[in-house]
Image (cartoon, rainbow, N blue to C red):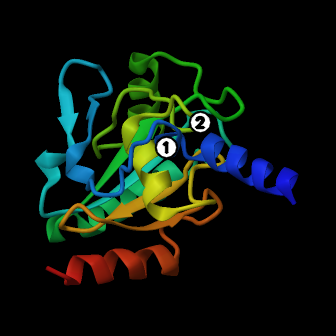
Amino acid sequence: MKNFIRTMMATTLFLFPGYAQGKDMTNHNAYDFSFKTLMGEAPLPLTQFEGKVIMIVNTASYCGFTSQFQALEEIYNVYRDDGFVVIGVPSNDFGGQEPGTNQEIATFCKANYGVTFPMASKEIVSGDNAHPFYLWARQTLGFGTAPKWNFHKYLVDRNGNLIDYFNSTTAPDSKRVKAAIEKALGEK
C-alpha cells in the first residue's frame, strides 16, 4: 500500500509540476498568459482576445494531422465575425514533427493552407518545461487533458475560462467541436 501511495504521489508531481512547486495555477484564467508571435517580433498576449472565444492548438508541419490546418482555417473564417479566434502554437514535442524555424513554419502554413489566424512562436507544450499556458491548462482541466500529440485543442470562453479540450483525433470541424464553439459564442 505504501508503494502504491508513493507511486501515485510521484506520478502526480510528475504530471502536475505546479503542485511540486507548491503553485496552484487554477485561480488564473487564459488572459494571464502570453505567447510571442510566430516571427517573435512582438508579444501575443491573450488579453488582446478578451471577450472572444479562443481555440489554442499545438501544431506541427510534418504530422499525420497537419491537414487539420485547413479545417482550423475554415472554422476560423466561419466564426471569426461572431468573436472566435484560433491560435496555432507550433511545437516539436511529438515525434520531432516541427523541426523548422519560425520563418519556415510561417511560410509552410501560408503556402500550403492559407493560414490567416494568429500563430505563436514555437513552444514546448508538454512536460515540466511546457509553456505556462499549457501547465495551467493541464492543472485546470485535470489528469489526462494535456496534449499527447500534435493538434490537441483547448477551448477558452469569452471570460478567459478554459471550458473544454479536444484530442488530436477530433477534427476541428467535427460536430462536437462546432457545437462547443457555438455554445461558447452564444454565452456572454
Please state which amino acid type lies under the numbered disc 1: Asn
Indicate the position of residue 98 as horizontal and vertical percent values: 58, 27
How crowded is the residue under tag 2: few (<14 C-alpha within 10 Å), some, or many (20+)? some
Q: CA distance from mark 2 to mark 1?
A: 14 Å
Which mark, residue 175? Answer: none
Q: Quick one: 151 or 148, which is closer to the camera?
A: 148
Look at mark 2 in the image and give the residue it sits on.
127
What residue sits 39% from the left and 43% below the top? 23
Whether 10 is drawn above or below 172: the answer is above
The image quadrant that residue 29 belongs to is: bottom left
Look at mark 1 in the image and give the residue it sits on.
58
How crowded is the residue under tag 1: few (<14 C-alpha within 10 Å), some, or many (20+)? many
Q: Nearer the viewer, mark 2 or mark 1?
A: 2
Indicate the position of residue 150 as horizontal and vertical percent values: 60, 44
Q: Is residue 114 visible?
A: no
Q: Is residue 154 visible?
A: yes
Please state which amino acid type lies under the numbered disc 2: Gly
Indicate the position of residue 17 as horizontal and vertical percent values: 53, 39
In the image, is 8 to the left or to the right of 135? right
What residue sits 28% from the left and 41% below the top? 118
As helix, strand or loop, the secondary structure at mark 1 comes to strand
Residues at discs 2 and 1 in contact (Cβ within 8 Å):
no
Q: Quadrant of the N terminus?
A: bottom right
Indicate the position of residue 91 as horizontal and vertical percent values: 52, 32
Among numbered discs 2 and 1, the one appearing first in the sequence: 1
What residue sits 49% from the left and 34% below the top? 130
Whether 96 is drawn above or below 94: the answer is above
In the image, is 61 to the left or to the right of 73? right
What residue sits 38% from the left and 38% below the top? 132
